[in-house]
Image (spheres, grey):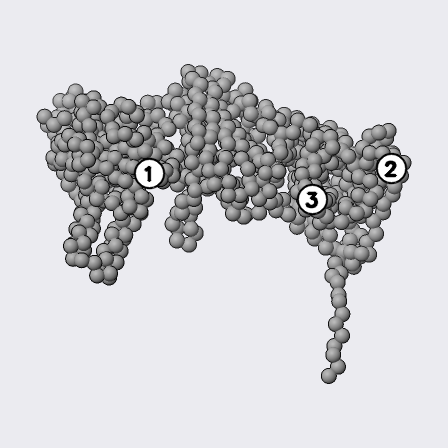
Amino acid sequence: MEERKRREHVFKPRARLMLLLGDELIRDTGIAVFELVKNAYDADASMCTVTLCHIHEEGNPDTNIVVEDNGTGMDLDTIRDVWLEPGAENRKDERVKGERTRKFKRLPLGEKGVGRFAAHKLGNEIQVVTRARHEKEVSVQIDWQDFEKAKYLSEVKINIEEREPKVFRRNSTGTRIEIRDLREMPWNKQRVRNLWRSITSICSPFKGPDDFKTCLKLEPNLGWLKGLLAPKDILKQSLFRFTGTIDGNVLSYDYEFTPRHQLEGIGIRTASKKQMPVVWFVEDPETGKKEKIMVDLDKFKIGPVRLVFHMFDQEPLVLRLASTDPGGLKAYLNNSGGVRVYRDGVRVYDFGEPGNDWLDLGSKRVNVPARRISNNQIVGAVMLNLEESTDLIEKTNREGFVESEAYKHFKYGVEFAVQQAQHERNFDKDRIHKVYSRGKKKEPVLEDLTRLRKEVEKRGLEKPLMPYIDRVETQYRDVLDRLLVAAGAGLNLAAVMHEVEKGISTLYDAISRGDDQKRLVTLARRLSDMVDGLNWLTRKTGKAKVKASVFIKQAIVNSEFRFRGHEIEIFNGIQHYDNPDFEVRCSRRLIMTVLSNLIDNAIYWLDVKGDKHKRLYIGTTYELNEMPAIVVADNGPGLVDPPEYLIQPFVSRKPDGMGLGLHIADEIMKTQNGRLLFPGVGDLTLPKGYTGAIIALEFKKEK
């Protein structure tokens, strides 16, 4: 059989491939102009001007868009061997080698060689005029419709002319791109204003390159840009400012609240936190379970991440008092609010654009809108060093970074920082609302009943009405009691189920291995005690005298398996340190709910701190106001917020926290004629080393 001849073949790209690439890679006008301006930055320009000519007049032959810079320009060889070769990696090679521009010492931002398709997105005809130092001027004419007419890419001829300077005369250099036969006409006011916002956002308003400016001109001047506020004007009106750095696996930050304009009666507040471990929770979409992620940027080439967040309060009264231009501020935030990403001070598109809620601020705000920041309440910047962040790779279509493991950790870290900024802001928002709220906050129902009683007594109607009022109060307190228990138990339901499942599994494994009967009985008794203890959280019981030692022992038994799993050493103060025991008349299940919440918090924060020797102490004391108290203390990172803030609902520094645990604990202690206290280190005698969170359940002395 005759052997078939093998022949080599090559790809023959169709001419219209260039048009398809342009449409796919460049999504809209904003990205198109952004890419052209970014090219000017890479060309070592100090200025790039975008001029829109007659863009409001459809059919006007003078309509065009001109993008001009004073950068290094290009010579004939560069046009022919680089600019006309889409995908050329000269910029990427320069960045990898660390080659910086001659004048401003910049590393190039471009790396894929596709930015020139931006011009096609804007119009069908372009003329590029460019001149390099000591070279002639080069003019390039491209009609993108030629790529529709020709069959193969090689058939499309590009007109290139080398000539004496006509645009860049004398010793000037740069590039001028004129785009005609615009693809979308006419332009309206809103579109022009959006483009202005896009151009002014190219350089960071916080720490952008001082040697690069952008400008948008409109010819003729239609007044469409009148009244637009620049980013720096907006930043001056922010009430809440947060600056921080994520370095490796820790966040350090400074925060400042500064009342402005007519917002009086509230003082400046500052806060500073150092070495806060960065942790995040990720939900499995299939199981719904949340996995804790210890974020560490040192695992990747990301470098330190610097953060600046300026936050606002859009409530009408606050906006009116705190701003000199409430309408302009609100309009800017609604159109240009959000958190953007910058490399070497130049923006990475399209983080922070209206359609890209990359930090999921909108979805997180749904459940507790008053406590969560939305994109129209923040103007923020995440700043990276280009040379150190090579593991964060921009998508070819200019829609953020490729979603690699490096990007995921980067995003988790920024989300954690936003949560801390949000936490600080909420504290001061509450201060504002206390001063400017229209009415005094009252305890619902109970205060109404008290007022009703007084009115009944005043009118001498005690006999016919008071029994009903007493019954209403009793029933209400009973319902409130049940709800507090249910809420507290609900917060720990996952932990409860986990412990019971683990206890059953441990006993099953021991039986399967043939462990001795004594050990099996011990495990079975522990499991029974645990379930019995958990029953306290739901069982209907009245108030009875219970010893503190019983509470402490049962709380430890309930969480014994968790302590082992998290490698936490637990100390019973009565057992190990001869703390005094005492009896208290209370609802057994409610106090167990409080202890369960406090232990749950302690386990979480001990894990976050990450020390090898994690210790938890539950004991008693009379040192606080000479009242009996149960004390829960640990050697974790400690409490960083004032007590009056910690007990408010929806206040939490946990990435996945609802912020109800301490609020419920405080409400329960009130129903038990007690108090939830937050002693400082040194306020009471504790074993050595417990310098983390210290929380006390104080009870009234039994008569």
Residue farthest to the right? 164
Looking at the image, do the residues carrying marks 3 and 1 touch, with CB atoms under 8 Å apart?
no
At label 2, counting other C-alpha atoms closer than 10 Å, the crowd grade (few under 14, some 14-19, many 20 or more) is many
Looking at the rendered structure, the secondary structure element under dot 1 is loop
Looking at the image, do the residues carrying marks 2 and 3 touch, with CB atoms under 8 Å apart?
no
* Residue 613: mark in rendering: 1
* Residue 93: mark in rendering: 3
The residues bearing labels 2 and 3 have C-alpha atoms spaced at a distance of 26 Å
**Residue drawn at (21%, 44%), measured in percent from left and top?**
557
Mark nearest the camera among 2 and 3 is 3
On screen, residue 181 above or below 106: below
Q: Position of residue 528 (x, y in %)?
A: 18, 50
**Residue drawn at (18%, 54%), measured in percent from left and top?**
519
Q: Which residue bears the numbered disc 2?
A: 136
What quarter of the picture does the C terminus occupy?
top left
Q: Position of residue 550 (x, y in %)?
A: 15, 38
Q: Is residue 23 left or right of residue 422?
A: right
